[in-house]
Image (cartoon, rainbow, N blue to C red):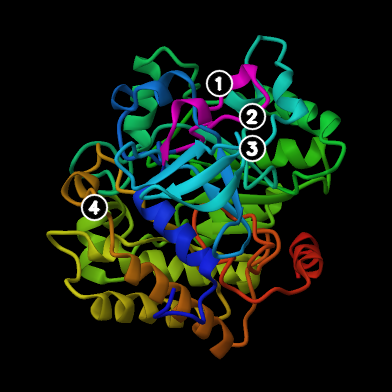
């Protein structure tokens, strides 16, 4: 905080929690779907630093989906943080002498902790008995409905899986633990879950939905990737026209396929580029390199801007894998320079990337080799260069992520929205909905 005093202190603490995880006192666990706290849904990846069998009590009584930090000696403004469990973390959530939950670092209370309330729609089930949390969980403090329609990836095995991704293992561990974890979610179930959310979310907190899942290199249910995910978007938009901002996270597909997404009613397209450096992309994303290739992937991202408009093409990258041993950059300066090059490449063309802070999940090759993740300095300097690059190209925060600014942001898996200046979020959301 002293070295980077121009970066909001909320973002500094949040990045440290996201990269290294949080430990929970048993009394701070949520109690699954039976209590008053919204539990962690494991909506696509594990986002934990231990496997379920290694989490102890946190595998039986789930931790909260997110926490919100306020106050403390740093006077933190409201900061929403996605929960990544790490029993070895120096950060511990526990009740204080007053019984109120706090975040403790090496025994010192540094923030008050709020837990997400159990939403009314989570208390209702589908006709077949499945929970809304299983079919259509919400994250970002209820802002985003996360629809993982296909919970495994067809990039499979050591020669194809992205080296930082545990989507396939996450599916296996939930099935092994006897937890409900539907591999392919039927469209009818998704619509029924959304009906429940729409009925009981009277405050209209849920503003957007994301359709995503594993990559489809052949077919699922006889459909290719564009038609598989597009079918959900079409059904949602027909049943709930204009109710939510519709987003799809998929591979960088050919322009004709991207047009199908647009025709189905999708408003924002996320063709994630994962990591910028050419050598690291080839090493970390072997399946994507084999089936598509980095140069073609980037060309398709640019082509998709002709369909959706540059403003509504928002590719993600996994911040921190640039420094993963044994292949990554060995200095923060080199890693930041590489990532900045990618930001300039896209932002100079009006496309605004966003990023997820890397969680080194232990079942992934990069997670096993780098249990501490990337240095905090890398993450803080990335926030700095992201904000300056955005300003250099005259861009503002991407649409579909809620309001920017410390104390306002709800995006929970990185601090990029917390580190940006506050602006009229309502105007940004309106632009996304209208396709501007």
Marks 4 and 1 sit apart, C-alpha to C-alpha, by 39 Å
Nearest to viewer (mark 3 / mark 2): 2
Q: Provide the residue span drawn in magenta.
A: 23-44
Is residue 36 in the magenta section? yes
Judging by the rendered image, the residue that carries numbered circle 4 is: 286
Vertical order, 426 against 333 (above or below): above
Label of residue 31 in the image: 1
Is disc 4 placed on a helix, strand or loop? helix
* N-term mark: 3 or 2: 2
Is residue 32 in the magenta section? yes
Judging by the rendered image, the residue that carries numbered circle 2 is: 37
Marks 4 and 2 sit apart, C-alpha to C-alpha, by 40 Å
Judging by the rendered image, the residue that carries numbered circle 3 is: 231
Nearest to viewer (mark 1 / mark 3): 1
Nearest to viewer (mark 4 / mark 2): 2
In the rendered image, which quarter is residue 229 located in? top right
Is disc 3 placed on a helix, strand or loop? helix
Q: Is the residue marked by circle 1 packed among few (<14), some (14-19), or many (20+) residues within 10 Å?
A: some
Do labels 3 and 4 touch, CB within 8 Å? no
Q: Is the residue marked by circle 3 packed among few (<14), some (14-19), or many (20+) residues within 10 Å?
A: some
* N-term mark: 4 or 1: 1
**Prevalent SS, magenta region:** loop
Do labels 4 and 1 touch, CB within 8 Å? no
Marks 3 and 4 sit apart, C-alpha to C-alpha, by 28 Å
Q: Position of residue 144 (x, y in %)?
A: 66, 46
Nearest to viewer (mark 3 / mark 4): 4
Q: Is residue 227 visible?
A: no
Residue at 80%, 39% in the rendered image: 238
């Amino acid at each position: 905080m002293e070295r980077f005093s121009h970066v909001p202190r909320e973002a500094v603490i949040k990045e440290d929690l996201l990269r290294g995880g949080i430990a929970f006192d048993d009394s701070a666990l949520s109690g699954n779907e039976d209590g008053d706290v919204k539990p962690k849904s494991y909506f696509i990846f594990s986002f934990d630093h231990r496997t379920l069998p290694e989490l102890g009590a946190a595998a039986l009584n789930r931790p909260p989906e997110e926490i919100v930090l306020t106050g403390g000696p740093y006077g933190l403004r409201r900061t929403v943080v996605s929960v990544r469990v790490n029993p070895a973390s120096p950060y511990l959530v526990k009740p204080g002498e007053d019984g109120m939950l706090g975040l403790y670092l090496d025994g010192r209370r540094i923030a008050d902790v709020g837990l997400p309330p159990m939403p009314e729609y989570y208390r209702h089930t589908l006709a077949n008995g499945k929970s809304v949390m299983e079919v259509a969980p919400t994250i970002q403090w209820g802002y985003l409905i996360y629809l993982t329609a296909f919970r495994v990836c067809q990039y499979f095995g050591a020669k194809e899986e992205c080296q930082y991704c545990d989507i396939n293992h996450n599916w296996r561990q939930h099935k092994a633990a006897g937890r409900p974890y539907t591999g392919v979610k039927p469209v009818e179930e998704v619509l029924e879950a959304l009906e429940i959310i729409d009925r009981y979310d009277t405050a209209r907190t849920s503003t957007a939905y994301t359709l995503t899942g594993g990559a489809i290199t052949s077919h699922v249910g006889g459909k290719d990737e564009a038609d598989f995910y597009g079918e959900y978007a079409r059904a949602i938009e027909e049943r709930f026209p204009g109710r939510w901002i519709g987003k799809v996270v998929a591979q960088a597909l050919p322009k004709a396929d991207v047009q199908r997404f647009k025709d189905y009613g999708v408003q924002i397209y996320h063709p994630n580029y994962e990591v910028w450096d050419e050598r690291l992309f080839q090493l970390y994303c072997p399946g994507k390199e084999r089936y598509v290739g980095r140069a073609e992937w980037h060309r398709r991202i640019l082509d998709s801007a002709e369909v959706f408009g540059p403003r509504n093409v928002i590719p993600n990258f996994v911040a921190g894998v640039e420094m993963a041993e044994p292949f990554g950059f060995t200095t923060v300066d080199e890693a930041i320079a590489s990532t900045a090059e990618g930001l300039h490449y896209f932002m100079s063309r009006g496309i605004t990337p966003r990023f997820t802070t890397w969680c080194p999940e232990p079942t992934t090759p990069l997670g096993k080799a780098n249990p501490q993740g990337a240095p905090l300095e890398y993450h803080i300097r990335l926030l700095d260069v992201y904000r300056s690059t955005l300003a250099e190209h005259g861009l503002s925060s991407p649409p579909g992520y809620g309001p920017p600014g410390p104390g306002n942001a709800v995006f929970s898996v990185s601090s990029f929205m917390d580190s940006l200046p506050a602006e009229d979020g309502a105007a940004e959301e309106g632009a996304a909905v209208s396709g501007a």
